[in-house]
Amino acid sequence: MSAADRLVRLYPRAWRERYGDEFLAIVQSGPLNVQQIVDIVSGAIDAWLSADVQRVTGTFRPTSNGGRSMRLKSLMVCDQSKLRYTPRDSLIGASVMIGATLAFTLLGTAALSRGWPTVGEFLMQVAFFAALALSLPFWLTKGQPWKAQAAIVGASLSLLMAARYLAS
């Protein structure tokens, strides 16, 4: 099973039935970069959460335009060969990372000085990774639906907290 076959399985069944073959034709044309994989994953999250996508896939009417659906082309961002974020977006994302890392570190230091060693150590240990997750909407997931961005950031932070809890 190829990576594209695994990625298409992230989408709901109705979406796969309607767009799966076209998706595979587009995605299997070459190797995927990180931005395209993020686009595919957030598109799958959006397909599960968005009422618009569910409505479109629920009313299946096969239409083709030279073997390709116009709707699929508009839903898929992953057909782009270049990255969507600009150097300005990268600087904003880096600023958010630096600011959030400093904020988590300062909060951790304050918690330690107040006599809360567990909270302080936690905040200081997760500072960088939490800041990275919080910076994603400013560069890597830029342009994705807000629900998909929230799910990716929320899942990242949840996994980070679960890993820290299990490590203690």
Image (tube, grey):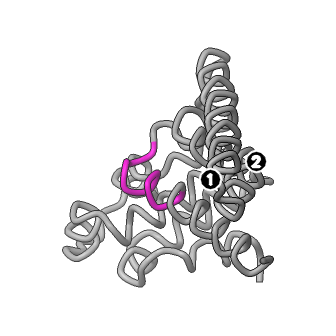
In the image, what residue type sits under mark 2? Asn
Please state the horizontal and vertical placement of residue 14, each as a whole percent of the image.
35, 81
Left or right for 90, reference 61: right
Distance between mark 1 and mark 2 Cα atoms: 9 Å
Boundaries of the magenta span? 144-152
- In the rendering, at what x and y percent does residue 67 appear? 46, 60
| Relative horizontal placement of residue 56, taking residue 105 as reference (left or right) | left
Decide which of 114, 28 is in the foreground and name it. Answer: 114
Residue 161, picture quadrant: bottom right
Q: Residue at x 46, y 51 (%)?
A: 149
Residue matched to label 1? 38
Is the residue marked by circle 1 packed among few (<14), some (14-19), or many (20+) residues within 10 Å? some
Q: Amino acid at mark 1?
A: Val
What is the quadrant of the C terminus in the image? bottom right
The residue pinned by badge 2 equals 33
User: Few, some or many C-alpha atoms within 10 Å of disc 2 (few <14, some 14-19, many ≥20)?
Assistant: few
Mark 1: which secondary structure?
A: helix
Question: Is residue 60 left or right of 166 when viewed as pictured?
Answer: left
Kindly state the secondary structure of the residue where label 2 is placed: loop
Q: Nearer the viewer, mark 1 or mark 2?
A: 1
The quadrant holding residue 8 is: bottom right
